[in-house]
Amino acid sequence: VYNSAPNWGVAVGDAVGVAEPVLNQHLHQHQGQTFSFVSLRVPSPLSLVVNGKRPPGHALAPPHLALTNPSAMPE
């Protein structure tokens, strides 16, 4: 689940509904080995239904702003 707060999650035994699931098949080769797996992408915890209810607003990770100035001289 992308964009979920670090202190939020679902527990074993919870019933989870995904409104608009995006299922992807991955196939990767690295150093002569092949890795294949399926992933289910969920863009936000707020798009889920957990045990019949929507997660609370604090389940969503707060935004972070990071600024860099690539033209600044290194110190």
Image (cartoon, rainbow, N blue to C red):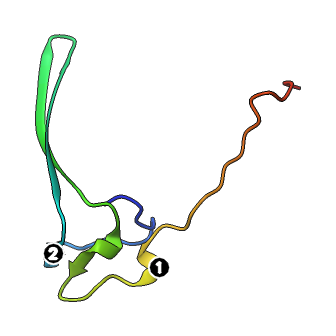
Q: Residues within 10 Å of mark 1 (few under 14, many from 20)?
A: few
At 11% from the left and 21% from the top, the residue drawn is 34
Left or right: 52 as drawn, with respect to 3:
left
- State the image coordinates of residue 52 (x, y, percent, origin top left): 18, 88
In the rendered structure, the answer to whether residue 67 lies left or right of residue 59 reads right
- Badge 1 marks a residue whose secondary structure is helix
Q: Residue at x 25, y 74 (%)?
A: 48
Residue at the spot x=15%, y=11% of the render?
Answer: 32
Q: Quadrant of the N terminus?
A: bottom left
Is disc 2 in contact with disc 1, using a CB cutoff of under 8 Å?
no
Residue type at mark 2 is Gly
Residue 58 percent location from the top left of the image: 47, 79
Read off the residue under disc 1: 58
Question: Of helix, strand and loop, which one carries label 2?
Answer: strand
41 shown above or below 13: above
Q: Earlier in the sequence, mark 2 or mark 1?
A: 2
Q: Nearer the viewer, residue 10 or 18?
A: 18
Residue extending farthest to the bottom is: 53
Give the residue type that dot 1 points to.
His
Tell me how far mark 2 sits from mark 1, CA to CA: 19 Å
Q: Is residue 7 left or right of residue 41?
A: right
Q: Position of residue 66 (x, y in %)?
A: 67, 49
Residue for badge 2: 17
Coordinates of residue 65 in the picture (x, y in percent)? 65, 55
Badge number at residue 22: none
> Looking at the image, is 63 positioned above or below residue 35?
below
Q: Residues within 10 Å of mark 2 (few under 14, many from 20)?
A: some
Residue 57: name its quadrant: bottom left
Q: Quadrant of the C terminus?
A: top right
**Residue 36 figure quarter:** top left
